[in-house]
Amino acid sequence: MKFSDVVSKLATVEQSSLNQHPTLDPEITGMAAIDEATVTTLSYIEGDKFASQIDTTAATALILPRNEGLQVRAAERGMAWVASPYPRLTFAEAIALFYQPFVPTPEIHPTAVIDPSATIGNNVAIGAHVVIQASVTVGDGVRIHPNVVIYPEAKIGDRTTLHANCVIHERTQIGSDCVIHSGAAIGSEGFGFVPTAEGWFKMQQSGRTVLEEGVEIGCNSTVDRPAVGETRIGRYTKLDNLVHIAHSCQIGEACAMAAQVGMAGGVNVGDRVILGGQVGIANQVNIGDGVQAGAQCGIHSDIAAGAIVLGSPAIPFKQFLRVAAAWNRLPEMQKTLRDVQKQLGLSRD
Amino acid sequence: MKFSDVVSKLATVEQSSLNQHPTLDPEITGMAAIDEATVTTLSYIEGDKFASQIDTTAATALILPRNEGLQVRAAERGMAWVASPYPRLTFAEAIALFYQPFVPTPEIHPTAVIDPSATIGNNVAIGAHVVIQASVTVGDGVRIHPNVVIYPEAKIGDRTTLHANCVIHERTQIGSDCVIHSGAAIGSEGFGFVPTAEGWFKMQQSGRTVLEEGVEIGCNSTVDRPAVGETRIGRYTKLDNLVHIAHSCQIGEACAMAAQVGMAGGVNVGDRVILGGQVGIANQVNIGDGVQAGAQCGIHSDIAAGAIVLGSPAIPFKQFLRVAAAWNRLPEMQKTLRDVQKQLGLSRD
Amino acid sequence: MKFSDVVSKLATVEQSSLNQHPTLDPEITGMAAIDEATVTTLSYIEGDKFASQIDTTAATALILPRNEGLQVRAAERGMAWVASPYPRLTFAEAIALFYQPFVPTPEIHPTAVIDPSATIGNNVAIGAHVVIQASVTVGDGVRIHPNVVIYPEAKIGDRTTLHANCVIHERTQIGSDCVIHSGAAIGSEGFGFVPTAEGWFKMQQSGRTVLEEGVEIGCNSTVDRPAVGETRIGRYTKLDNLVHIAHSCQIGEACAMAAQVGMAGGVNVGDRVILGGQVGIANQVNIGDGVQAGAQCGIHSDIAAGAIVLGSPAIPFKQFLRVAAAWNRLPEMQKTLRDVQKQLGLSRD
């Protein structure tokens, strides 16, 4: 496909920017990162980190930000380019022109074991060795990859994908257009043990887990159900791999949580919250809308909407930067303090 | 069921406390958290955090602690209540009156693949696509959910439950009344590689993993077996999801470990130890009986019995609180120190 | 087997050291840790931590380091011993004399579902309920345990082992002599969501994951594929359980990563890097050859080759030790500083 044809199919570019060098119109066969580009691949530059690649890349076609310097340099090097206010988004758009993800054929494999009381929608793909238990409801266009197990009374919304070997536990409700990646366990028993003089008393987990529409759960992540009520993840929220969401957590809409995040029971997370990798949140904590927490944060108390926090215990990120800088200089501070004590004739404690 | 009937079935309440308001006896249809209560659900209050809910809850029936203020307030609001020295435990008891957890029917699904040399007890449920390999022993009343794989020579004790897609490796011994949740891997090879000039030399992991009776292992957790000897988890110990127990660890009885705890090889953990989420323990460390370690602790050296620790590296929690408070004020300390140096005419280092 | 016979089969010992006590030649039936030794097991001592066991062990045969004190003491206690420059390596060698790991028979179970377009090599073991999809290539001598799922177009190299319930995603290339442990997910979709005003836009993950020869991936670990290009793990690199490798990471050769390590997208790791448990690495960071990072490190910026780092944010370990020591004394420093201020008549800020 000619570069100009690719560009004509992209909604997020500034089409007008293409006309500046109409003679540069290479054939594009696929997409590549800027440092792995070839003469037939399309790449993008966004942010300062990769800007210097403009001088060395083998690419002959680029998606560029609104940055005149980069644009001039691309032209100097004989590269076709198009401008976008959101180069990474445009790159994502362009990938979808060249790549058709694997989706299973909408048929039910004969080795699948489906309870007669289950309700299965139209155009559903059910892979080999899938197990669907009593009173499960599967919506239209659902894709269930091999070896998935669905416990009784779960509901799977329209067009949702369940990847191989994930487990959906009893009563779980998964909305439409969700993706559950391989090995994830959804709606399993919350960790509910009451300490007694005789040991741990198991609290039955009679509640359920609800994932609203458009939720994505990463590989081998776990979302537990509570003793009573619901664990709920709001629509369009995305979880990476190996994330743990405990019983009774209420997660808002359009959040993103990087790999290995863990939260204890009853945490309330607002909308559009972003958590870095390995963040931990203590039980019953409230996280306001739009909060961003850096990787490895340990959050032990409520965080106000819009705050950006770092550290364990988590503190506002500006404070963290100052504290971390001082932290590195602690031994020097200690030495200085000793000198001061000596000068003043103060005894050292 | 009438509230009075519910109460009459609860072993942990003070039955006498019910008689104070015999006319208040609502119909109870289920259990709910205090902030999600309705006129037909039973809730509980325990601890200060939820005490203020007494003024706003829609509940008409409550399990209350021995707290006269709360009891008077409940009566004023026209709510039936009963006192318990352990409200949360009583709540757990009451859930079990209303909730029958899903258990599979004790039958062997025709798609299960069971080696003829395996020994299967009475009243065992073996789900679809389960694989049980050579010389495995499965006790009476065991429940094996679909797609579980049991490697050769493992033993599964009476009444133990193996949830979907978990894997039990060769020679593993699981005691009676254990629960292994979905996706957990028990008795897999320890991470045993010896560095040599030519690279990593794999040490065969000839040992086994032993779980004593009443142990519970969370979803997608892993308990490795050692090169020689045993990895052992003592009876009634409970592990949450995504926990990693390395080869040769010896865990005591009645411990509880929150999600994403990880421990390196050869760690010794005493009885009744409680580890918060994401705690890490270095290899060969000894943790005494009754130790409590807060979330995200990094434990690099032995911890004496009964200690409560926080931080990474972990220190006694009282010290941690003081250090953390000072840590937050580090930039101010640094500034003060500079002022002092200036006042004294000391050169800044 | 006589101790002398065992020793004669070990390549890494100093054979000559055996002749000093030829009359001590006990029968050896197996291997044991030094603190669990019996009169018929062989153990080893390496390092100071276990040296004192020489006085108490029940062993009658030992692998010892080049340490005359230990050798003399062993002789005094009537124990047979042999010296090795690498006692732990020798111990690993000796285990392999006594232990035959379980390997499945090279046959294809009738319940396996194999797409007719797949290419299967010679002497392959394919367990019950395995699913192999379109255009997959499986090399010679591969061992696939039960319930494994392989998505289309994946390649599995010769003699590689896939343990139960792991999932190999589309286009993944696994080299020869690899081991993928139970529940691991290889080549799954990277966490690629582009923020837009309307929410998260999913970037298709059109790339692939490549594991070179001799790679080992622990139970329930995840190695994602990228939007474009490759995620690659170099030959002989070993990952423990519950590790997360994000899209586009490039990992060198002969690295070792302990359990629960996580790295964000686009991280470059050199050769022979060792990461402790729960280490986290931020996106796009470069880690030089031979770097060692202690458990729970948080690495946010590039680390030069050969560096040893600790802490979060990670700093050189010598600096970390000094900082951590001062950190513990922060409250005392704060008090001293107040005393100094008082002495100088400075106002407290």
Image: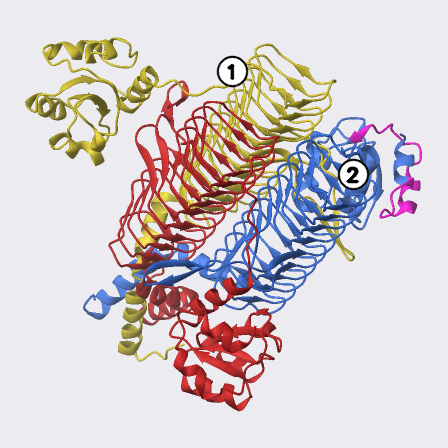
Chain colours: A blue, B red, C yellow
Q: Is residue A342 left or right of residue A100?
A: left
In this view, which residue lies farthest toward the left?
Answer: C76
Residue kind at label 2, given as amino acid type: Arg
* Residue name at image x 65 percent, y 42 percent: A181
Q: Residues within 10 Å of mark 2 (few under 14, many from 20)?
A: few
For image coordinates 72% across by 54% down, the residue present is A236
| Magenta residue check for A26 | yes
Q: Position of residue C94 (x, y in %)?
A: 30, 18
Same chain, labels 1 and 2: no
Chain letter, disc 1 residue = C
- Indicate which disc residue A73 carries: 2
Relative to residue B263, is residue A266 drawn left or right? right
Write down the quadrant of residue A342 in the picture. bottom left
**SS under mark 2:** helix
In which chain is the residue bearing label 2?
Answer: A
**Label 1 sits on residue:** C105
Q: Is residue B259 left or right of residue C284?
A: left
Magenta residues, as a range?
Answer: A8-30
Say what amino acid the circle numbered 1 marks. Thr
